């Protein structure tokens, strides 16, 4: 067992209280913290001060690579590797390469999105200290949590606990690392 705890966890009864607490935690300058909710809370990412994810950009790059791969594949096979002149038709036409390019665009976008999500989210993660909290299952049912980690530069056990109480947090506990 580690000597230093993972952080402090505070319980909230509803999404509105959690939303306002997240704004207060963000405004207080905490950087290493998270919210656990049983359902999506509209606008919570903005209240937490989170930036847009880079996964859509990774998906776009995957789609562009897929489209270019499809066009290049058809060009290579029709104009360079096995050129066939049939009835005066051109060796390469984007019109005929489009179905293959379209399908590869979708395939490469899907792969890029999945790989991007795994990389950005740090998956697979088989363990997290919050799983040791005895009431964490309530975070998947009817309770909302804010967790402030000890690695945060502003973290101080007593001050952070008092701050979480001020935001309306209940049952504030230390999490084992």
Image (cartoon, rainbow, N blue to C red):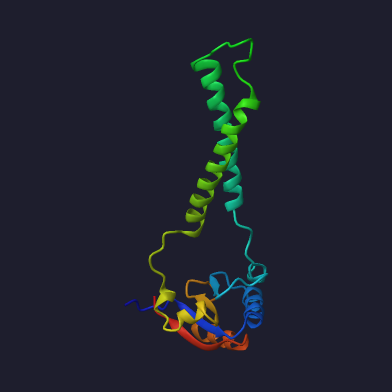
> Which quarter of the figure has residue 46?
bottom right
Q: Please identify the quadrant where the C terminus is shown.
A: bottom left
Q: Is residue 98 above or below residue 57?
A: above
| Residue that extends furthest to the front in the rendered view of this protein | 87
Looking at the image, which is closer to me, 151 or 84?
84
Q: Is residue 96 visible?
A: yes
Q: Nearer the viewer, residue 162 or 40?
A: 40
Q: Is residue 65 visible?
A: no
Residue located farthest toward the left when viewing the structure as drawn: 1
Task: Residue 149: give x, y in percent of width and height.
Answer: 49, 74
Picture quadrant where residue 48 is located = bottom right
- Towards the viewer: 134 or 8: 134
- Image: 90 above or below 46: above
Q: Is residue 78 above or below residue 118?
A: above
Quarter of the image containing the N terminus?
bottom left
Q: How many marks?
A: 0
Which percent across, then down, holds residue 108? Answer: 53, 42
Q: Residue at x 54, y 50 (%)?
A: 113
- Provide residue 111's location: percent of width, then percent of height: 50, 46
Q: Name which residue lies at 66% across and 81% down.
A: 16
Q: Residue at x 62, y 31 (%)?
A: 98
Q: Nearer the viewer, residue 23 or 124?
A: 124
Give the x, y percent position of residue 45. 63, 67
């Amino acid at each position: 067992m580690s000597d230093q705890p993972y952080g402090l966890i505070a319980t909230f009864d509803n999404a509105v209280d959690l939303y306002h607490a997240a704004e207060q935690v963000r405004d207080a300058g905490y950087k290493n913290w998270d919210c656990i909710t049983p359902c999506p809370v509209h606008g919570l990412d903005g209240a937490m001060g989170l930036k847009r994810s880079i996964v859509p950009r990774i998906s776009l790059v995957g789609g562009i690579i897929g489209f270019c791969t499809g066009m290049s594949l058809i060009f290579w096979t029709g104009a360079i590797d096995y050129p066939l002149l049939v009835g005066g038709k051109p060796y390469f036409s984007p019109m005929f390469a489009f179905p293959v390019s379209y399908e590869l665009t979708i395939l490469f976008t899907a792969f890029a999105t999945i790989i991007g999500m795994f990389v950005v989210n740090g998956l697979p993660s088989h363990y997290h200290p919050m799983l040791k909290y005895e009431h964490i299952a309530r975070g998947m049912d009817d309770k909302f949590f804010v967790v402030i980690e000890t690695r945060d530069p502003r973290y101080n056990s007593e001050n952070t606990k008092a701050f979480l109480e001020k935001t309306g947090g209940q049952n504030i506990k230390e999490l084992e690392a």
